[in-house]
Amino acid sequence: PAEMSISSFVDSGVPMQTVFVRDLSEQAALKKSIRLAEERLRITLESAGVGTFDWDIAAGRLTNDERCATMLFYEPGDIGASVEAWTALIYPDDRAIGMQAVNAHFKGETDRYFYQKRMRAKDRSWRWLHETGRVVERDAAGKPLRALGVLVAVTDMKRAQEELRKTARRLSL
C-alpha cells in the first residue's frame, strides 16, 4: 500500500507538479500486528473467564469489561461505573480484607494487591471472585492515580475445596 499526493503550482509562468509517494507497508503491517495481538488477548481473557478493569482512583470510576458484570449474572452497565456501586456488592466481612490489601499496595508496600471476596450476584447468591490489581500511574508525590486489574470467578473452586474438606473430615472419623 502507498499514499500519493500531487500538488500543482506555477513557477515563473511554467505549470509544475510535485508528486509525493509514501510506502505504507510498514504501517499496515504494524496495524495488523496490533490487531492480532488485541484479538489474541481478547480471546485468551474470554477463554479464561477473566474480567478486566481500569480504575481511575482520583475520580472513583471503574471501567470494566463485560465479563466483570456477567460473572455476577448482571448485564454490562447494570452496576454502573462508580467504585461505590461495586463496593456495595462485596460481602461486608470481605471489604476490610480487600481495603487492607489495596491500601498496603497504594502505600508501596507490595508490588500488587490481591484478595478473594464474595460479591452479591444479580440472583442474590454470593459469588467468590479473586481480584488482582496494580497501580500503573502515580502523581509526582507518589499518590496513586490509576490501577489496572483482573477479576476471576472462583466460586466453583471454593465449592470444590469445601467438598474436599468435608470428605477429609469424614475420612478422619
Image: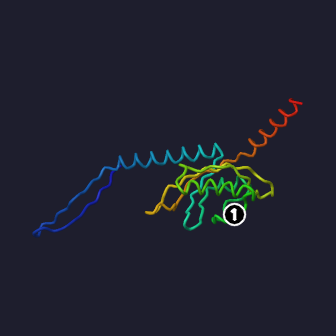
Could you tell me residue 171's position as x and y percent?
Answer: 86, 29
The structure residue drawn at horizontal position 85% and vertical position 34%, both measured from the top left corner, is 169
Q: Does 137 appear above or below 162?
A: below
> From the viewer's perspective, is 98 left or right of 148?
right
The residue that label 1 is drawn on is 79
Question: Camera-side residue: 68 or 37?
Answer: 68
Res. 76 image quadrant? bottom right
Quarter of the image with the C terminus is top right
> From the viewer's perspective, is 17 left or right of 102?
left
The structure residue drawn at horizontal position 74% and vertical position 53%, both measured from the top left corner, is 118
Could you tell me residue 18's position as x and y percent?
Answer: 21, 60
Question: Camera-side residue: 73 or 107?
Answer: 107
Could you tell me residue 34's position as x and y percent?
Answer: 46, 48
Question: Camera-side residue: 142 or 157?
Answer: 142
> From the viewer's perspective, is 46 left or right of 93?
left
Colouring mode (rainbow / by chain / secondary structure / one colour): rainbow
Q: Residues within 10 Å of mark 1 (few under 14, many from 20)?
A: some
Q: Amino acid at mark 1?
A: Ile
